[in-house]
Image (spheres, rainbow, N blue to C red):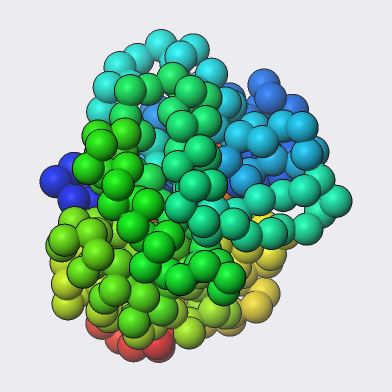
Amino acid sequence: MQSRRIGDVQVSAIGLGGMPMSIEGRPDEERSIRTIHAALDAGINLIDTADAYHLHADEVGHNESLIARALATYGGDTSHVLVATKGGHLRPGDGSWTINGSPEYLKRACEASLKRLGVDAIGLYQHHRPDPKVPYAESIGAIRDLLDEGKIRMAGISNADPDQIREAQEILGGRLVSVQNQFSPAFRSSEPELELCDQLGIAFLPWSPLGGIGRADQLGGHAAAFAAIAERHGVSPQRVCLAWQLAKSPVVIPIPGASRPETIRDSAQAPELTLTADELASLG
């Protein structure tokens, strides 16, 4: 597996997004753990999660706990695995998503994530989404405090615009290591954030890089150019999609969600697929 960099840590060029294993339509735990183990077997050592990845109100942190169990039961070495989690989103249990970016809440959420993951310090902690009711500087100030206190080793942000990226970088004293925004063939409005991360040398982690839950397996149908190139190479359109994103910048590290071992194994092979300049130009 090729590697890329988040802060001073080398990670696999493709990560594993854990959300599909814990929200609506989730598989049984046995299949989820097999999926996580398959990712590790394929050389993936970046796993993205969040305390809000759960279904019912009384199971906050379901995905974090699942990942902790999967790592504990894996037969190989997991010391090199970077688990990235997030705080600031909430799920009341009725299917909705709410936001709480208050410093007090973010610090409590981080403490709870520490316990669920069973670690002394979280490898990468990300502010999940800006809260319009809380000044962004206050939310990021809480992340800075967690970093200074050693409760998190690296700090990132998610769902941020260019001005927020610059503000977070300033508040964190140049220690912002990652930005996680939605980006896919069908959702390209985060291109300015990707370009800014490239300029600053900050990792850009596309979420829903294949178009999101329930749509990833239809990528070929929605994007004929991806399907045509996939047929030419004898691979899946999804693999072409991830290779296209990797070619955009060395700071890009896609984190496709998966709930089956087969899909994450396919995604893990994307770094080995080299697209020609003409192919990349046709994809935009």
Which residue is drawn at the image coordinates 62% and 46% (left, top)? 52
In the rendered image, residue 195, in percent from the top left (x then y), is placed at: 27, 80
Image quadrant for the N terminus?
top left
In the rendered image, residue 217, in percent from the top left (x then y), is placed at: 66, 60
- Residue 133 vs 214, above or below: the answer is below
Which residue is drawn at the image coordinates 25% and 34% (left, top)? 150
**100 or 125, which lies in front?**
100
In the rendered image, residue 210, in percent from the top left (x then y), is placed at: 55, 64
In the figure, residue 174 lies in which quadrant?
A: bottom left
Numbered-mark total = 0
Residue 173 in view in this figure: yes
- On screen, residue 10 versus residue 117, left or right, reads left
Residue 12 in view in this figure: no
- Residue 256 vs 9, above or below: the answer is below
In the figure, residue 205 lies in which quadrant?
A: bottom left
Which residue is drawn at the image coordinates 72% and 32% (left, top)? 59
In the figure, residue 63 lies in which quadrant?
A: top right
**62 or 139, which lies in front?**
139
Which residue is drawn at the image coordinates 77% and 32% (left, top)? 58
Image quadrant for the C terminus?
bottom left
- On screen, residue 52 versus residue 192, left or right, reads right
In the rendered image, residue 245, in percent from the top left (x then y), is placed at: 37, 69
- Residue 198 vs 235, above or below: the answer is below
